[in-house]
């Protein structure tokens, strides 16, 4: 979901959570200009009736996703959200996934693979090889309180 916001006759978009490289600030809805956020530089390319959001990583423009300016309502998202949160084959019901943007870095965890991005640089991938490493990442990096999860160690061990 991308939200369009009008401020003083200027259109902006804000991304409400696409994934690990979500823009960390609003982007002006204007194609072909480079726009720096606190973490990376983005640009929008317009083609017919849709935009492609691209991110610059190590001086290479990488496409992230496409969107258009048609109005969508909450029911338009319900089936997709239900699927990704409940279907037995969904990535989100079969994986441990977390991401967070801090002032200097982005951290993305998928199962036991921790990716670290530093301001527009390509990711540095680290394999977490123990339950203790996973617990430490979840609590220290992602700031998740772990004391209320039953069978957590067993679940984390299955990810290794």
Image (cartoon, helix red, strand yellow):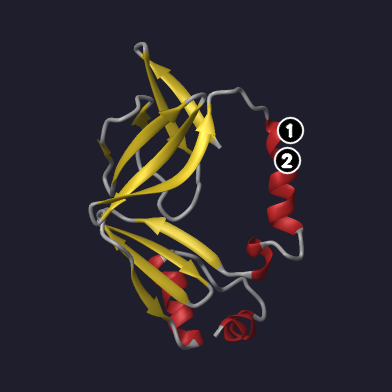
Q: Residue at x 24, y 57 (%)?
A: 58
Compared across the picture, whether 139 is left or right of 1 comes to: left
Q: Residue at x 59, y 84 (%)?
A: 153
Q: Quadrant of residue 94?
A: bottom right
Give percent across and percent down for residue 31: 35, 27
Q: Quadrant of residue 129?
A: bottom left
Q: How busy is the neighbourhood of tag 2: few (under 14 within 10 Å), some, or many (20 plus)?
A: few
Give percent across and percent down for residue 35: 27, 35
Q: Are marks 2 and 1 in contact (CB under 8 Å)?
A: yes
What SS does tag 2 mark?
Answer: helix
Compared across the picture, whether 141 is left or right of 134 comes to: left
* Front residue of this view, candidates 60 and 12: 60
Q: Is 51 drawn above or below residue 21 in the view shown?
A: above
Residue corresponding to mark 1: 75
Q: Residue at x 41, y 47 (%)?
A: 63
Q: How busy is the neighbourhood of tag 1: few (under 14 within 10 Å), some, or many (20 plus)?
A: few
Q: Quadrant of residue 99?
A: bottom left
Q: Residue at x 61, y 23 (%)?
A: 71
What SS does tag 1 mark?
Answer: helix
Q: Is 5 drawn above or below residue 100 in the view shown?
A: above
Residue corresponding to mark 2: 78
Where, quadrant-wise, is the N terminus in this rendering?
top right
């Amino acid at each position: 979901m991308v939200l369009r916001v009008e401020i003083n006759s200027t259109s902006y978009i804000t991304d409400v959570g696409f994934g690990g490289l979500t823009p960390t600030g609003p982007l002006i809805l204007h194609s072909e200009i480079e726009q720096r956020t606190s973490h990376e530089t983005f640009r929008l390319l317009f083609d017919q009736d849709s935009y492609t959001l691209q991110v610059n990583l190590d001086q290479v423009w990488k496409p992230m996703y496409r969107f258009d300016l048609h109005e969508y309502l909450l029911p338009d998202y319900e089936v997709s959200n239900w699927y990704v949160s409940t279907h037995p084959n969904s990535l989100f019901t079969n994986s441990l996934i977390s991401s967070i943007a801090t002032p200097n870095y982005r951290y993305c965890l998928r199962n036991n693979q921790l990716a670290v991005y530093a301001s527009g640089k390509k990711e540095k991938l680290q394999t977490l090889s123990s339950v203790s490493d996973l617990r430490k990442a979840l609590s220290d990096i992602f700031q998740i309180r772990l004391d209320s999860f039953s069978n957590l160690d067993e679940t984390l061990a299955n990810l290794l």
